[in-house]
Amino acid sequence: MSEYDPATIERKWQARWAEAAAFRVAAADPGRRRFYALEMLPYPSGRIHMGHVRNYSIGDAVARFRRMRGEQVLHVIGWDAFGLPAENAAIQNGAEPRAWTLDNIDTMRAQLKRLGIGYDWSREVATCLPEYYRWNQWMFLRMLERGIAFRARRMLNWCDSCGTVLANEQVVSGRCWRCDNPVLRREFDQWFLRITDYAQELLDGIDALPAWPDRVRTMQRNWIGRSEGATVRFPVDGGDDRIEVFTTRIDTIFGATYVALAVEHPLVATLARGTAQEKAVAEFVAAESSRSVEDRFGETAAKVGVFTGRHAVNPFSGASIPIWVANFVLTDVGTGAIMSVPAHDERDFAFARTHGLPVRPVVRAADASAADAGLPFVDDGVLFDSGPYDGLASAAARARLTAIAEEKGFGARTVTFRLKDWGVSRQRYWGTPIPVVHCEKDGIVPVPDAQLPVVLPDDAPLTGVGGSPLAQLPAFVETTCPKCGGPARRETDTMDTFVDSCWYYFRYCDPHNARAPFDWAAVAPWFPVDLYIGGIEHATMHLIYTRFWTKVMRDLGLASIDEPVTQLFTQGMVIKDGAKMSKSKGNVVDPDAMIERFGADTTRLFSLFAAPPERDLEWSDAGIEGCSRFLGRLWRTFDRARAALPAPGTPPPPAAGEGGALDLRRKTHRTVRRITDDLGPRMHLNTPVAAVMELLNAVAPVAAEEPVLPGPAWALREAFETIAKVLAPFAPHVAEEIWEALGHPAFVADASWPEPDTVLLLDEDVLLVIQINGKVRGKLTVPRGLGEEAALAAARADAHVAAHLSGKTIRKSVYVPDRLLNLVAS
Ligand code: ANZ
């Protein structure tokens, strides 16, 4: 008898899979259903962590299952290989970013192979290699030609500690998403991608993604932040200036008691000039500009402001109201200026109270009983003290007032989005060089396609201070203008690394293309991606950018789909002692140590078994030990029984249809049905493991019989063959080993998924409880798995139930298969 020896088994099967290139996909086969299983590509930080193990175990389980069901499965991995940590390692310990990154990739690739994930390794992509990033550059140039990429001077988020600008998405509660330092606002010349042109389409497209989690869809909707309203221009007293405000509540305009400008609003600099407030305004602006984003705009930030000394005229009422500068008005939302209506807006109300500004109610509840709700009254209602519009309902008033503003030329219906153009410039080294040059004569000149890639030099000085490292490298910077041949300077900004992850999974489908990012003919059969698995933290940034990029590629004629991913699955985190595993908390469990101690199969099994995949998984030593014991027990049970099993392909003897043999066969087939359901779009990946454990419990006593008679022996072979197959997506090595020992020369990974025998499923009877209006009126013996219609028919056929239903109509029926039929009748 042999002991379960995962190290030997796993090495053996990993070598065989590699030798046979078992998971290689040459080209899409038009004759088969295809399945593209995709996991978010890792950043090569050095070593894989348990979150990776979980992510890839989920993906591999589904991929292997689909493959066994006869589908052609594409399953690839790559490396999101540009980014700050490589640069920081260079600054801290003199590592060379390229070598550091490629070393890490080697380490992590070996780790993934030790886990036995079934990837097509011939399609691996690393985004830091010129053969990949040249196509970032190429697509950037196409976007530049179409005005999708553009350069502008804008207020941006600046992280002092990372020394770079950040996209809005990279500012989390006013802090840098990476280093957690407070973010500042600074003005820069930057490269942008016009994602706002796609805002409406990105929003509408969410409706076409029913297989994305509602949570992600909501987060994307909020991120895009569409808001419908009007712009209205308020003339400034004593001059030609006009302040344009954006409001969603033009119905409250008669209640506006002041106008408020963002600190960065262009009129702030001039309005106060010559008034008694000039000095106060200048001081306020200076103080606010030096405060962090969180101090200025955070939830708890004090709402402060200063009077400009000037007034504006309400174009509807003619009232003259003071103009303030206020920190709560955001520069890049709407027009950067608002009309404040304290009686109907919380924030305006608080600010008015603090600064002694008047509160003027103009809308009251339509329903008199709610009239004494107090101020501010923020709901829609009926207008009063609003001149000719008194008595109009809010919605009607908005339509009417907007139309009048348009007619008279001082306003317009307007839709604004919270989504801003994507700032893609980074003053960092380890990223894709932006492929343009600056020529004194010709201005910004694109690098011609023939000169791509603009290769990132290896020898930039990395100190972490003094701006872009590339700018300090004359050999890189000094070049000639492709247009006039005169001296020019290369752009030294690199691209945000979120560019890299926008389209890597298109490249997986055509990874070695040297003439184009990819050939759509090679990609189309795999798209849209059937299942994309990753963390919820990518709900907005990556998953919005990649949707945008897909639409841009479509418009460039590179692809012909609107949405790249059919089903998105967001897996939960791996936590220990109640917190996400992290070095700083010292609660990290190293996957390699687990593989070393228990084997890859156990490690994978635990990461799937311990929690539903969408939930957080609490690490437990006892749990992984339990999985290890289960595989050990499986192996020993099999090893003891194998001598008694009939040869492969032996037809069932009549005795396989009786007694204990029949019971085991039923259990086997029921297990198949359960696991098949669980591995479908429902993604209940934790329960199959439990089902296999139960099946093993049924197997053990049969295997222990002395001697094993022909009927049970046949049922045992069927059970072990089934276990090998249904365990293959989860614990593929031990599954291969058992499959081979059962006498099969080919991989279990290539075996066909078992089909349950419906006769064996239906033969099993269950007790179905029939309730009518909450009372138990019958208990029927019915076959397991009975459908709702058949259950209802069976219930009606029962005399006692029929008596309680006579003369009544069934209004509602709730059916819990194999358990309960609950009828509401009257
Ligand atoms: C007057 C008003 C009266 C408003 C009222 C609300 C209630 P959403 O729906 O989130 O888009 N606003 C406009 N631009 C702003 C800016 N740059 N910074 C801060 N606030 C701004 O919000 C739209 C409302 O947010 C607008 O409608 C405006 O206040 C404010 F009873 O105008 B409202």
Image (spheres, helix red, strand yellow):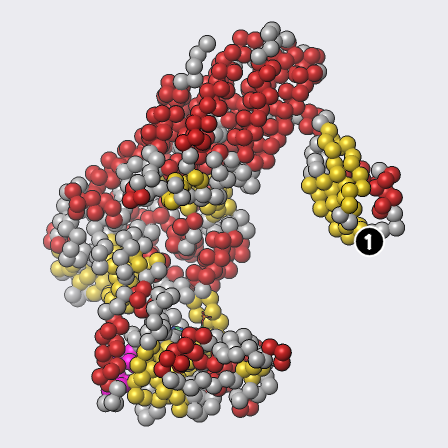
- In the image, is residue 719 above or below residue 574? above
Query: Which of the two residues, 551 or 726, is positioned nearer the viewer here?
Result: 726
x and y percent of residue 607 in the render? 44, 34
- In the image, is residue 692 above or below residue 367? above
Q: Which residues are magenta?
A: 266-273
Q: Quadrant of ligand 1?
A: bottom left
User: On the rendered structure, is 115 left or right of 677?
Assistant: left
User: On the rendered structure, is 397 left or right of 513?
Assistant: right
| Identity, as a three-letter code, of the amino acid under mark 1 | Ser
User: On the rendered structure, is 87 left or right of 513?
Assistant: left
Mark 1: is the Cβ under 8 angstroms from ligand 1?
A: no
- In the image, is residue 747 above or below residue 609? above
Rendered image quadrant of residue 698: top right
Query: Which of the two residues, 699 or 200, is positioned nearer the viewer here?
Result: 699
x and y percent of residue 740 in the render? 48, 16
| Magenta-drawn stretch contains 272 | yes
Q: Which residue is mark 1?
A: 826
Under circle 1, the secondary element is loop
The residue at the point 48 percent across, 46 percent down is 568
The residue at the point 21 percent across, 50 percent down is 429
The residue at the point 57 percent across, 12 percent down is 704
The residue at the point 85 percent across, 51 percent down is 808
| Number of marks present in the image shown | 1
| Magenta-drawn stretch contains 376 | no
User: Taking the image as drawn, is residue 649 in sight?
Assistant: no
User: Taking the image as drawn, is residue 796 in sight?
Assistant: yes
x and y percent of residue 424 in the render? 30, 57
x and y percent of residue 314 in the render? 43, 88
